[in-house]
Image (tube, rainbow, N blue to C red):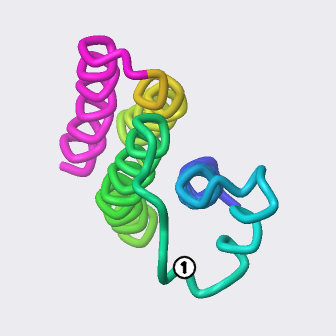
């Protein structure tokens, strides 16, 4: 497997854990009623705490970013255009997203935006590296 495809796999794992964490925080799964709710149909979810709300927004944002990243990475791989610039952009994107998750969940608004911007730069590097 190529280094570029490994970044796709790593982003899939990161996305999964973001979704899982958000789900468990929303249900308050560390309590018995929350665990029962998490294992059920989730029809009567409690109002999310600020932390759970941030975790949910983090998970959704990570999933949205993963779609864009995966599209670029798979096009680069399929077109045999996994240039050093594409690979460097993928690496920058991945590490920025890995940093973004705890920063967003912690509620560090301006830092979050800066790290998000670094991830977008990584995506732009991938796009320009395809040319």
Q: Position of residue 100 (x, y in %)?
A: 44, 28
Question: In the depicted view, which residue is nearer to us: 29 or 123?
Answer: 29
Q: Residue at x 49, y 34 (%)?
A: 101
Q: Residues within 10 Å of mark 1 (few under 14, many from 20)?
A: few
Give yes or no for residue 127 being in the magenta stretch.
yes
Relative horizontal placement of residue 51, taking residue 118 as reference (left or right): right
Q: Residue at x 21, y 38 (%)?
A: 124
- Residue at the far right in the pictured view: 32
According to the image, label 1 marks what residue?
42
Q: Position of residue 82 (x, y in %)?
A: 43, 51
Give yes or no for residue 111 being in the magenta stretch.
yes
Q: Position of residue 45 (x, y in %)?
A: 48, 69
Q: Residue at x 33, y 66 (%)?
A: 71
In which quadrant of the rendered view does residue 84 lie? top left
* Residue 42 against residue 88 in the figure, above or below: below
Circle count: 1
Question: In the depicted view, which residue is nearer to us: 42 or 8?
Answer: 42
Relative horizontal placement of residue 34, taking residue 101 as reference (left or right): right
Q: Main secondary structure of the magenta part?
A: helix
* Residue 14 against residue 101 in the figure, above or below: below
Q: Position of residue 42 (x, y in %)?
A: 54, 79
Quadrant of the snapshot with the N terminus = bottom right
Question: In the depicted view, which residue is nearer to us: 121 or 60?
Answer: 60
* Residue 12 against residue 55 in the figure, above or below: below
Q: Which residues are magenta?
A: 107-131
């Amino acid at each position: 497997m190529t280094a570029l495809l490994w970044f796709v796999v790593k982003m899939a794992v990161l996305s999964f854990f973001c979704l899982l964490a958000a789900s468990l925080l929303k249900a308050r799964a560390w309590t018995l009623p929350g665990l029962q709710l998490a294992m059920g149909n989730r029809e009567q979810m409690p109002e999310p705490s600020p932390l759970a709300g941030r975790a949910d927004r983090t998970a959704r944002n990570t999933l949205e970013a993963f779609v864009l990243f995966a599209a670029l990475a798979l096009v680069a791989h399929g077109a045999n255009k996994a240039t050093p610039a594409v690979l460097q952009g993928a690496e920058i994107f991945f590490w920025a997203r890995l940093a973004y998750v705890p920063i967003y969940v912690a509620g560090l608004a301006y830092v979050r935006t800066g790290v998000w911007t670094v991830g977008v730069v990584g995506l732009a590097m991938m796009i320009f590296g395809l040319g």
